[in-house]
Amino acid sequence: MAAFATTSAPSIALRSTSDISRASRVAVAKPTTLNASFKKALPAQLTASRVGQTADRRSLSVRATAAASVGAAPQPLYPRVVPEKLPKLYVYDHCPFCVRVRVALGIKNVKHEVVFMANDDVATPTALVGKKIAPIIELPDGTVMAESMDIIDVIDGDAKYGPTGAIAPKSGRKDISGWQKEVKELLRLLHRPRYMMAALPEFQQRDSRDYFVGGHPVPPYDKPEWKSDDFPMEKKVEAYKGAYAQSDELIPQINEALKKLDDMIDSPEACNPEGGVSMDDIDLWARLRSVTIIDGLEMPIKMRAYMDYFAEVADCPLYFCMKC
């Protein structure tokens, strides 16, 4: 059987999703290293102290830019909100829809509990909302709801969770949505095998990895073909290995695509020239987060600053230390 190994680990013959996970144990422990000139381009030193502040979105962006220019850590955009009973957010770490809500709560500076469900856990979400879905939030008043956009609307519209209207609505930008459509298949080939290799909380056990592989095809296969009786698990695992084996061809493609997207990002603090955090940022950052799991990624400096800025102010880590 063909080998499927990371650049940092010895070649290992893989026969299951468990093998996929084990093959990268050496690689995921490797820290990201940055040269001195690149460090100067980053918006912040993540260990600096934070101070709360309030203001409109535009002035917040101006002050954040000033802080970045002198090397200070991005400050929380709003005062800390600590409900007596914390909202409980049920998520998968890799899921961009779950990340949307994590970023929104982070931007609002709302303390909350994050529950990482195993990917094959059907019972927990079904008991909460009647079906397997994520994200799900359980609010202090007992309200339980799903759907990321609905959750964000509630959080940003209720004064119990800080100033309302802190997140501007989507602008309808066609350039960014068009870019996302262009790279959709490419990212599936790059992301999905790596989710099985990295130590993500929802994939800690073989059953969870098998569940994901069983339901998530890699191109060129579509879901009906993938789920047919003629496509057993062994063939699915081979397809995942085949996708990863294309890394030398695929990574230069995503690097070129990121250069195009970099031109669409206005600043480290906002993708739109109007400034301030918008749903465009919430959605774009949540989708881009997973590219940081790719070893060999060459992220443009402005985009890297954008990713690091939101990782800090939204309190949601990137995957650079787990890249494979």
Image (tube, grey):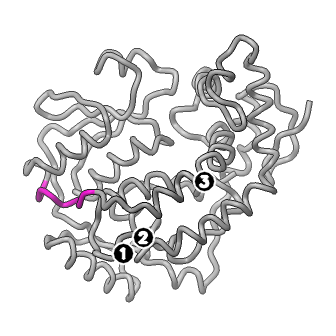
- Mark drawn on residue 73: 1
Residue at horizontal 32 percent and vertical 40 percent from the top? 148
- Mark drawn on residue 132: none
Say if the magenta span includes residue 10: no
Q: Looking at the rendering, which quadrant does residue 44 occupy?
A: bottom left
- The vertical placement of 316 against 210, above or below, is below
Q: Where is residue 78 in the image (x, y as percent from the top left)?
A: 18, 64
Magenta span covers which residues?
162-169
Q: Looking at the rendering, which quadrant does residue 80 occupy?
A: bottom left
Q: Do the residues labelled 1 and 2 touch (CB within 8 Å)?
A: yes
Q: Mark 2 points at which residue?
A: 46
For the residue pair 314 and 30, the one nearer the viewer reads as: 314
| Mark 3 nearby-residue class (10 Å; few <14, some 14–19, many ≥20) | some
| Mark 2 nearby-residue class (10 Å; few <14, some 14–19, many ≥20) | some
Q: Name the residue under label 3.
A: 183
Q: Position of residue 197 (x, y in %)?
A: 68, 40
